[in-house]
Image (spheres, rainbow, N blue to C red):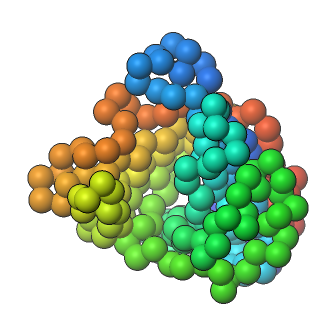
Amino acid sequence: MSVSPQLAQLATWMAGHFNNLHQAIAEPVWFANIHVYQCPLPWSVFQGIGFYVEQLYDIYPDQPYRQRVIHLFETPDGIRIQNYALGSPEAYKCAGRDLGKLASLAAAELELLPGCAVQVEWTGSCYRGRSVPGKGCIVERKGRTTYLYSEFEIGADYFHSLDQGRDPETDQVVWGSLSGPFRFVKKQDFSCYLPRWS
């Protein structure tokens, strides 16, 4: 297995447990205290780099509100991250605190989410990602059709993330943060669980 230096660095920085407690304390009206777990998957899942991603509120530690799988790979335009849904999310619930649950995860359990990809670029000091153009990542929420717009910035010890559901016609924000990105700090490093590559 072979991985470029930039892809290896991005994966290393992404692997971990992140939390925004400092932001939630400073701006409690706008930001809840959230934990994000980005857990490396076995190489065999994608024959490449993948993560199980789980997000949960601090007050509900056993009730993740988002579970997904992502695949990191290189294209002629740079690094891309593709999102997948889990066929049986309950089987991997709280795997962020029990990484052994992920040992049996297989590609056959995943459903590709069309249009839900993020293009990543290296800025010279950090990585920045943004939803690919096209408004193709459709999310139905509370009876409304929206498209997911995502962007992030990640460094060695931080992860800033913005997810918004927008109206396909007007681009108005229907759900998600109206006060800028969530600013997470890495609390635990999971890079030791990444597959070894040459």
Residue at 46% x, 17% y: name it: 27
Q: Position of residue 130 (x, y in %)?
A: 40, 54
Q: For the C terminus, give its image quadrant.
A: bottom right
Q: Nearer the viewer, residue 98 or 59?
A: 59
Measured along the vertical axis of the image, is residue 104 above or below residue 34? below
Identify the residue shown where x is 26% and y is 68%.
134
How many numbered markers are drawn?
A: 0
| Residue 127 in the figure: left or right of residue 37 | left
Vertical relation: 41 (above or below) 30: below
Quadrant housing residue 49 = bottom right
Locate the N terminus by quadrant. bottom right
Left of 106 or right of it: where is 130?
A: left
The residue depicted at 55 percent of the width and 50 percent of the height is 65
- Residue sitting at the far left: 170
Left or right: 171 in relation to 189: left
Q: Position of residue 33 (x, y in %)?
A: 58, 28
Q: Nearer the viewer, residue 164 or 94?
A: 94
Query: Who's the residue at 42% across and 42% down the image?
Result: 162
Mark yes or no: residue 188 visible: yes
Q: Position of residue 55 (x, y in %)?
A: 60, 47
Find the residue positioned furthest to the bottom. 108
Percent x, y of residue 79: 53, 64
Q: Quadrant of residue 51?
A: bottom right
From this viewpoint, is residue 4 visible? Answer: no
